[in-house]
Each structure stands twice: as structure tokens, then as C-alpha cells.
Amino acid sequence: MSENECHVYRDRESNSTYVGDPFVGVPVSRDIVEAVATQFHIKADSLARALREVQNTSVINVETLFTGFDPLPVGRSDEGLLYVLAEADGCWDTVADQIGLTEDGRDAVATAHDRQVREMVGDREVRGGSGFVVSCSEFPADAIDDIVAVVEKTRLTNRQATTWILSQYVPGSDAIARILSIPESVVQSELATVDRTTRRSAAETRTLDVPGPLTRLEPEPQSPTWMGLDWSRWFDLRDGKTLREELPRRPGLYRVRHTELPGLMYVGESGSEGGVRQRVGLGLSAGLSGSDRQTGDPHGAARPLQQITEIAGGNMEVSVTTPPISSNRRHRRAIEATLVAVCRREIGWTPMVQLNREPAEHVSSPHSELHRELRNIAERSSYSVPSWQPWRDVTAPHWLGLSWTESRPLSERDKIDSTGVYAFRLWREDQTGERWGQTVQEMGTTGSISSRLFKLQNGYGDDMRFSVVALDGLSTDTQRRSRELREVRHDIIGAHYLATGTLPEAQF
């Protein structure tokens, strides 16, 4: 042994040669281990052994870092290793005491971790302390760039930004708590802090909320400020006289609820000359009371709404909103799609009589469980609701939790299987700026993907990028399948509008 050689372990016997491959299970690459070993004049196999032991301790792990410090995730390996930066150098003293490392061994282990993380960071300018490599196989790799972007643009702590971004990738605070190994109460507290910060600061709002006329902070469909809109009070839908007197003559949107059933019955929009007063007060209300023949303006939702009240009792109520932007037909229809999509996400099914549904016709017979049966019918007749995780990056490979194909230029459209029904999205490759700032040129659904992509290529050229997702589980009934495809279009157009503040350029 060289007289300049140092030891990793205080116990001399622990520094003996390791039997077997010393680099198996080591969270740092062999090149880095050997380079650090040379730097500290220690044996590479002893350092590898120490790194493996550190990985198995309870000192340097996700729970320790996210509970006691403020780590910033900067990368994740295919093997489920999470790379973070944190001001947590004191942890290495605890590790050294626990597994018996010398000062040189402690410093070498810390240097190896830091160098591995710095290699992952590369040329990016990311600040956050020293590097740590920990096991966290459930952490979504796609979320990391979003976390770093939020930290750079807001005053959120690293943990708050991590928690908030994860809420867009995984279902619920309990799942976030499991990934980060922290109490669910801490997750809920951090998310509440993010919401308060969003409301308080215009700078944070531009990043943490959404860029258009809506907000993500009020998702409950019956809220008086649902999606950030100023909704009217709830009116009895049968009280046509009051509706005709009080509703505005401006373009806008409206929602209908039943007094004894959850969620919404219907969401609509009106740009007619008489605004929401004509559409709701003269059309929908009159249709519900059977006097629509006198108005000459029948509403398709009136009959199924009336059928529900006839068998289930209760009342139908309506609330309207007329934001200035609703005078623009395209934006008004995009907001309607967003409201339907968010209602589906929050409640779990499409508004009961949306898209010409007539749930009352499928009720077996009046009975004590009628309300439950109506809810079950609404859920069964709705196409599966996407997870919306993630939703902010509209060109992400797993946008809305769907399995989109890898993006390709339209010149490679022949690589897509021509059979089946698909949703598609199309965007320009030369878009610059942040991922959350990207917009889609056109999106929709089709039962003939080859023909649709051919037409898109003729219209946009070879270089426009596209991605598709197969729509499984569609009904074999033509009418029902048509409704399901409209639900999918509501989901993707609505999510796009909420995320970007704009609708796809070719839509509506």
C-alpha cells in the first residue's frame, strides 16, 4: 500500500478488499467513483462499498431530505435514483458516525454524490446546495423540469414547488406524501400555501395559475366563483318571469343543477342577440314548463331536464355568467368546453343531460334509490375521464395522463397504425419559449387517422409535428360513440384553453 494512501473506514478490517464486484448497487457511476478515489488517495472498491452502505442507511434518503431540508430535484435515472440539491452537508457527519467513515471517507462519499448530481445538471444554471443521490422510483421524471422552472420564477420553496408540481402528475395528496415520504398533512399545508401565494402576487399568478380568463383555484362546479368567473345567484329554472326580468341580454355561459343531485346537469353558452336571457329565460325555461312552442326557441336540454324532475322530484336551478371575453364566439365556446372538461374531472362524469343525454329514460322504475341510479347512469354513460396528470404542458408525451405517441413530423405520418379511433394534436416545431407557453395548432378526434393526417399534411406541410393517442373502450353504438368523441374533444380543447389561455388556432 502506498504511504500516501488514506482509508475510507476507521476500522482497518473494513478497508480490506471486497469479495465480488464492488460496484454492484452503487448509486454513483464507476468513472466518478474511481476519479474521486484517486483524488482522495483511497481504494475505489472501499469507496464503492461505502457508497452502497450509505444508500442503505436511513440518514441520506428522501424522507430525511424532504422532512428536514428544502431539496431541489434536478434529475432521475432509469434505475429510480433521484438527484437532488440541498443544503444538508451536516448529514454526512451523521452518516460517517453511523457506518464508521474516516474524515477522508466522509468527504469522498459526499464528493461522489455531488459530482454525480452535477453531471446530471450539466450546463444548466441550477442553484441549491450540494448534490445527493437517493432512491425514489415513483418520482415522475417529467415533473423535474417543471419544478426547476417554478423555483426560478417564484418565491416558493423547493419543497412547495415540488409538492405543487407533483399534484399535477399524481392522484391526490396521499400519493405525493408516499413519494416524498412525508406526512400527508404537510403536503396539504404546502399546497394551501401555494394557493395563497397565487392569489397574493401577480408575478406568482402568471406561473402558478393559468394565463387566460379562467383560474385553476376554483374548480368546484357549483361554486359562485367557479373557474374564476363571476356567476349569478341560482334561479329556479321554472321561474321564467324572473329569468326574463333579471338575466342580462349579453353573450355568456350558463350552468344547470338539480337541488338534490351532485354536480351539474348541463353547461351551455349563448351568443344570440338576446344573450343568455333569450337562451335561458325564453328557450330553456319555457321548454322546461312546456311553453316553448310559444317562444319559437326550443332548447334541446329542456325535455331531459323535465324528465328528471318528474321522476326524481326536486328543482332545476340555473346560474349565468357574462365575462367580457364571451362576446368572442371562439373564446366563449372554448370556455364552455373547459367548463365541461373541468366538471368531468371534478365530479367523475359528464353533466347528466349534456350532449343530448336522456338519463331518465334508462331508469328501471321509480324507487328509493332513484338518485343513486341516476348518478350511476351518468357515470356509465360518460367516456372515461382522463387523470389530467400532467396538464400544463400541452405537448407533453403523457399530457392529461394519456399515452400519446412520440411526436413526429407529418412527413412520417405513415408510421401510425391506420386502424382504430384516435385523438390527435398538431403543433409547430419552431415554437420557442417555455414548455408551458407552447400551444397546439389543431386537435380533435378521428376514425380515419390516415386520411386525417394526409389532409393535415396537405394543409400544413411536412414539418408540422403531430402526436396521437388511441381511444380504447368506445361504444359500438353509433350515437353513443359520437357523444364519447365529443367528450374527448371537450377534454383536450378545454385542458388546452385552461393551460394556455388560448384555443388551438384552427378550432371553432
Image: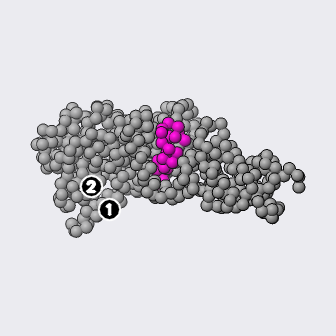
Q: Secondary structure at mark 2?
A: loop
**Farthest residue toward the bottom?**
368
Q: Residue at x 35, y 60 (%)?
A: 380
Q: Which of labels 1 and 2 is toward the front?
A: 1
Q: Residue at x 31, y 45 (%)?
A: 226
Residue type at numbered disc 2: Glu
Q: Residue at x 53, y 58 (%)?
A: 181
Residue type at numbered disc 1: Asn
- Horizontal side of residue 289 vs 427, given as left or right: left
The circle drawn on residue 376 is: 1
Q: Residue at x 38, y 44 (%)?
A: 196
Mark before the other along the chain sequence, 1 or 2? 2
Instruction: List x then y, in percent, for residue 245.
Output: 12, 38
The circle drawn on residue 358 is: 2
Q: In this orientation, which residue lies closer to the viewer: 106 or 56?
A: 106
The circle drawn on residue 133 is: none
